[in-house]
Image (spheres, grey):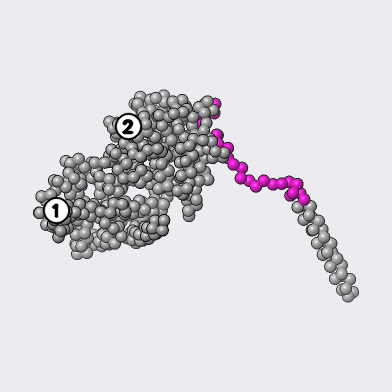
Amino acid sequence: MAADNKREKEREEVHRAIWAIADELRGAVDGWDFKNYVLGTMFYRYISENLTAYIDEGEIEAGNTDFSYARMSDADAEEAREGLVQEKGFFIPPSELFCNVRARASIDENLNETLERVFRNIENSAQGSQSEADFAGLFDDFDVNSNKLGSTVAKRNERLAKLLDGIAAMNLGSVKEHDIDAFGDAYEYLMTMYASNAGKSGGEFFTPADISELLTRLGTVGKKKINKVYDPACGSGSLLLKTEKVLGKDAVEIGFFGQEINITTYNLCRINLFLHDIGFDKFDIECEDTLINPQHWDDEPFELIVSNPPYSIKWAGDDNPLLINDPRFAPAGVLAPKSKADMAFIMHSLSWLAPNGTAAIVCFPGIMYRGGAEQKIRKYLVDNNFVDCIIQLPSNLFFGTSIATCIMVMKKGKTDNKILFLDATDECVKVTNNNRLTQENISHIVDAFTKREDVQYFCRLVSYDEVKDQNYNLSVSTYVEAEDKREKIDIKKLNAEIKTIVAREQVLRDEIDKIIAEIEEGRPDE
């Protein structure tokens, strides 16, 4: 335990130092705008060190103990290009490695052009190979000629050189020590900091770690491994990656799948997966509108779906005549309202779910009780026994919104026709301006979810008929009685106390009147 605490303390110190460097590097640039430079440079350092360690290790094992890929000539290294692209998915010649570009940065008058060329070469190295889609456009958001970096080329290059030095100074250990996962861990930490400082913008691309863990644990109860995990609105990929942390390395057999509409966030997601040592052949992240143009039609269904889709966004709905016949939405007989796409994400996820799978999705609370099309979709979900559990979460858990959200857990292979309703509004601790779920909170929720037993004021297993009688209202408060925490008052006792106070008050008044009378008697006549 002491060793764990020591390691956690060291980790926190590293994180604080990393944030201090990142914050100092941005200077006058807004942190949200500058995040792509810090995160992109961290990725450049990581893949440079990852490739170097891979090559050096192979040579040292072969007996070439003095070998150093970083000191090789580009011409000699070129011979290994084809094999490395097949094995690692990309190639970087020694002169373009992070350490060598950084060593020359202070005297490179064309540093911006150098970095632009290096990044383009990394992306191009994957062209025509299996990893092409995973590397294409990865550095698009790293604009070396942006005025945000400085008004002149010289000023931009000065900032870029500081950026390389700053990222090099981050204590991230050796990429060979995968159990530490320092690069991925630091990346997640930086994204948390950027998201928390960015408010609403941050909430759109990052799901806090405690929510990610809760969703993943709900979706993997009783499982040691799964075929693959999918997120239809994957943001920067934090939810996808939580599966490996919860179940362990290699527990996701086929890989990580997701779709993200925002290209900047899509690039951050792919970088995040690489930094967590997920091979290019074990993930498929696509950049398209999930509801209108889903990209994983041909994949077998997913055993785990975890998602925190955008709340109540507009979508085409019945303006697009093709959607009502889309096999994802057609079974419900109605489309989600044009002004609120929430139920469209639910139906999409259900369609992609394996027969033995579980989907755990964060939902806007309104979809649980509103009428119209949303009520008809709830009816379809309940009548067909797809809804396994509804969990009411505390407020203020997410960046950019204080609203109290819910989780809908769906399964296709339920063993009963009941729904568990769970009120977790008190399962949190306050941390600065936000609420957070502790490990105890998460375990309490998951244990109740697993047992499916009634617990007064906390959870209740409700029959299909009762839900039907409530017109398919799925709000937790409809089924779980809230505990009355108001202080109970004993009226008789209170009246007795008031009587005593009044009596004492009268005694005091009498005493005061007596003192005043004595003073007036002793006063000489005027």
Q: Is residue 178 above or below residue 153?
A: above
Residue 214 in the image, given as x and y percentages of width and height? 42, 43
Magenta-colored segment: predominant secondary structure? loop
Q: Is residue 82 above or below residue 155?
A: above
| Callout 2 secondary element | loop
Residue 121 in the image, given as x and y percentages of width and height? 18, 50
Q: Residue at x 63, y 46 (%)?
A: 486
Residue on which the image places disc 1:
62
Q: Please provide the residue range marked out in magenta.
A: 469-496
Which mark lies nearer to you, 1 or 2? 1
Pick the residue in front: 337 or 392: 392
Q: Residue at x 12, y 49 (%)?
A: 80
Going by the numbered disc 2, the residue's amino acid type is Pro
Going by the numbered disc 1, the residue's amino acid type is Ala
Residue on which the image places disc 2:
301
Q: Do the residues under discs 1 and 2 have CB atoms within 8 angstroms?
A: no
Residue 412 in the image, given as x and y percentages of width and height? 40, 29
- Quadrant into which the N terminus falls: bottom left
